[in-house]
Image: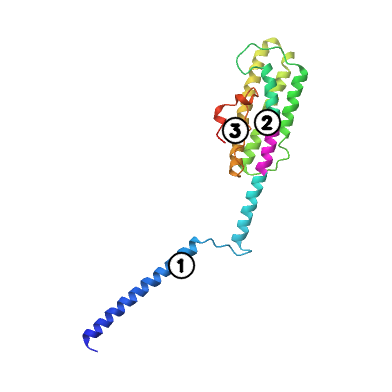
């Protein structure tokens, strides 16, 4: 074999080796990419498998607690609305002359409704922090409105010069209770959507009228 032939053969050998290296690298890269993009089930009993099962269980438990929280909120919502509607006849939401004192039986009924609203959440399990925030907002709103009604109940026996101040305090706490309830209702709406249940609206108006709920809480379903 002459020098020219040996040079030619060596050149082709280098070319073939280079092509082979490129081909092998491409195949390896392709296999690596498929391995990383494909979902590989963790081995049974492995840490990854246990973590996946725990995560799935926690998601199911959160959805169940959200459902229970929603049911309790619906029950409490009806009682809160009824108490607010009654209280609005005695302490108008809009500025107006003070009406006569409400009947004692009516006031007692408002207080029963509000106690029931606050206790409606007692059977709901402790959940995540965002679930606890919603639950505490609902319970706090019911309890705050109850204190307002209790003070109203003492109004008739209060000195005449103190009644306007007391009425103003009752109205302020009613409005604060409604704002607190709205915060819980907004949180519950988010929780229900996240769990795949769609919107859940349990918002309130200060006078208990569902048609008076601010438009900002009437999101498209």
Q: Is residue 44 above or below residue 13?
A: above
Q: Residue at x 60, y 57 (%)?
A: 52
Query: Would you place residue 53 above or below residue 1 in this image?
Result: above
Q: CA distance from mark 1 to mark 3?
A: 52 Å
Which residue bears the numbered disc 2? 77
Residue denoted by label 1: 31
Q: How is the image coloured?
A: rainbow
Residue in the foreground of this view, choosing between 54 and 77 = 77
- Magenta residues (range): 65-77
Residue 183: numbered disc = 3
- Residue at 22% from the left image edge and 86% from the top image edge: 3
Which residue is the extreme one toward the right? 105
Q: Are marks 2 and 1 in contact (CB under 8 Å)?
A: no
Q: Which sits earlier in the primary sequence, circle 2 or circle 1?
A: 1
Q: Which secondary structure, mark 1? A: helix
Residue 59 is a magenta residue? no
Report crowding for label 3: few under 14, some 14 to 19, many 20 or more residues within 10 A (C-alpha): some
**Residue plotted at (73% across, 24% down):** 110
Q: Which mark is residue 215?
A: none
> How would you classify the magenta stretch by its main secondary structure?
helix
Q: Residue 14: x and y, percent?
A: 30, 77
Q: Quadrant of residue 102?
A: top right
Quadrant holding the N terminus:
bottom left
> In the image, residue 209 lies at what x, y percent?
64, 24
Residue 6 picture quarter: bottom left
How would you rate the neighbour count of disc 2 (Cα within 10 Å): few for under 14, some for 14-19, many for 20 or more?
many
Q: From the viewer's perspective, is the residue at label 2 or at label 3 nearer? A: 2
Of mark 2 and mark 3, the one earlier in the sequence is 2
The residue shown at (66%, 38%) is: 70
Q: Mark 3: which secondary structure?
A: helix
């Amino acid at each position: 074999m002459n020098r020219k032939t040996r040079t030619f053969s060596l050149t082709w050998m280098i070319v073939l080796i280079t092509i082979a290296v490129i081909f092998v690298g491409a195949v390896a890269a392709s296999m690596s990419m498929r391995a990383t993009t494909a979902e590989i089930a963790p081995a049974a009993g492995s840490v990854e498998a246990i973590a996946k099962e725990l995560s799935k269980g926690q998601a199911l438990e959160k959805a169940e607690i959200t459902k229970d929280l929603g049911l309790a909120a619906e029950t409490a919502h009806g009682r809160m609305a009824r108490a607010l509607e009654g209280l609005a006849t005695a302490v108008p939401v809009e500025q107006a002359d003070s009406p006569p004192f409400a009947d004692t039986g009516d006031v007692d009924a408002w207080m029963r409704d509000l106690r029931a609203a606050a206790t409606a959440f007692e059977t709901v399990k402790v959940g995540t922090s965002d679930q606890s925030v919603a639950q505490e907002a609902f319970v706090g709103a019911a309890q705050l409105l109850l204190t307002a009604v209790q003070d109203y109940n003492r109004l008739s026996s209060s000195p005449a010069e103190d009644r306007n101040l007391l009425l103003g305090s009752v109205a302020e706490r009613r409005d604060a209770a409604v704002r607190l309830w709205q915060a819980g209702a907004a949180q519950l709406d988010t929780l229900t959507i996240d769990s795949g249940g769609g919107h859940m609206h349990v918002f309130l108006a200060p006078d208990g009228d569902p048609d008076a709920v601010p438009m900002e809480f009437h999101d498209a379903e």
